[in-house]
Image (cartoon, rainbow, N blue to C red):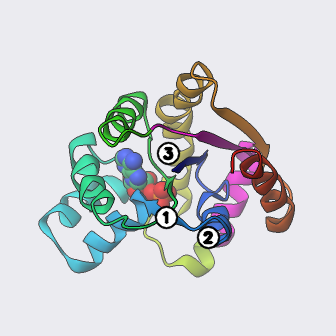
């Protein structure tokens, strides 16, 4: 199976690129952010607790993420692989993902690191705020999400560099330009 981690700061284009490549490579798209937003929209107990973290731009506790992800992994069916979007968000989650995959005889095939400078991330999120309706797309929360990314999330890259599966992608171009780079990286693996 092709197990892809799409990685990068908030607003780096992870969701957009996932949508493009999910279809091309017959992958199952697992976005922990989307799974959380579905729990929140459904008003579940987990969703209510998660909301207090996401609204502030902080990470939801690992055990909640593991719970929703394990449920989603059970539903991957006949997909040729999985694209993990928004997970792992810290080094502990990276170890959890490796363990989850190992139990299935699998491992992370590649981590695609969409590299985008902070100013561009903030600009893109402020632009998205006008249309997304997301409670966490506001200036205060955006600032915190970028900070959390640098402090807690970005060390995940080093974790996978050490495993020799990290590919850096210039994420500053247009959607199509970035997709071309992403596809070139994936074509080497399939
Ligand atoms: P995203 O849609 O990936 O930008 O995620 C939106 C928000 O959901 C994040 O700011 C976090 O509060 C929460 N979230 C998403 N994925 C995770 C994760 N793997 N671990 C912890 N919190 C997460």
Q: CA distance from mark 1 to mark 3?
A: 26 Å
Percent coordinates x, y for residue 144 in the rendering: 49, 45
* Residue labelled with disc 2: 19
Dot 1 crowding, Cα within 10 Å, few <14, some 14–19, many 20+? many
Residue at the image point whose x is 37% and y is 60% from the top: 55
Residue beneath the point at 61% across and 40% down = 110
Q: Is residue 121 magenta?
A: yes
For disc 1, the marked residue is: 29
Identify the residue at image location x=44%, y=41%: 88
In the rendered image of this protein, does residue 26 appear above or below residue 9? below
CB under 8 Å between discs 2 and 1: yes
- Relative to 32, is 4 on the left or the right? right
User: Crowding at label 3, few (<14), some or many (≥20) Cα neighbours within 10 Å?
Assistant: some
Count of numbered circles on the image: 3
For label 3, the residue is: 144
* Magenta residues, start to end: 107-128
The reply to whether residue 58 is visible in this rendering is no
Q: Earlier in the sequence, mark 3 or mark 2?
A: 2
Farthest left residue in view: 45
Mark closer to the observer (1, 3):
1
User: Residue 106 versus residue 67: which sits nearer the camera?
Assistant: 106
Q: Quadrant of residue 146?
A: top right
Image quadrant where residue 61 sits: top left
Q: Position of residue 173 (x, y in %)?
A: 86, 57
Between discs 2 and 1, the one toward the N terminus: 2
43 sits left or right of 22 in the view? left
SS assignment at label 2: helix
- Circles 3 and 2 in contact, beta carbons < 8 Å: no
Judged from the image, the secondary structure of the residue bearing numbered disc 3 is helix
Q: CA distance from mark 3 to mark 2?
A: 26 Å
For disc 2, the neighbor class at 10 Å (few under 14, some 14 to 19, many from 20) is: some
Label 2, ligand 1: CB separation under 8 Å: no
């Amino acid at each position: 199976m092709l197990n892809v981690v799409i990685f990068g700061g908030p607003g780096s284009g992870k969701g957009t690129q996932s949508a493009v490549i999910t279809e091309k490579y017959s992958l199952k798209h697992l976005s922990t952010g989307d799974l959380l937003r579905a729990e929140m929209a459904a008003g579940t107990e987990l969703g209510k607790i998660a909301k207090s973290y996401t609204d502030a731009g902080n990470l939801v506790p690992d055990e909640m993420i593991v719970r929703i992800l394990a449920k989603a992994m059970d539903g991957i069916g006949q997909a040729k692989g999985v694209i993990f979007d928004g997970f792992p968000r810290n080094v502990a989650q990276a170890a959890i993902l490796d363990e989850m995959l190992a139990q299935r005889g699998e491992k992370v095939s590649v981590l695609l690191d969409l590299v985008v400078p902070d100013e561009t991330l903030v600009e893109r999120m402020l632009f998205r705020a006008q249309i997304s309706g997301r409670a966490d797309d506001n200036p205060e929360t955006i600032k915190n999400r970028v900070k959390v990314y640098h402090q807690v999330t970005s060390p995940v890259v080093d974790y996978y560099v050490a495993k020799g599966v990290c590919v850096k992608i210039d994420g500053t171009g247009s959607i199509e330009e970035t997709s071309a780079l992403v596809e070139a990286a994936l074509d080497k693996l399939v």
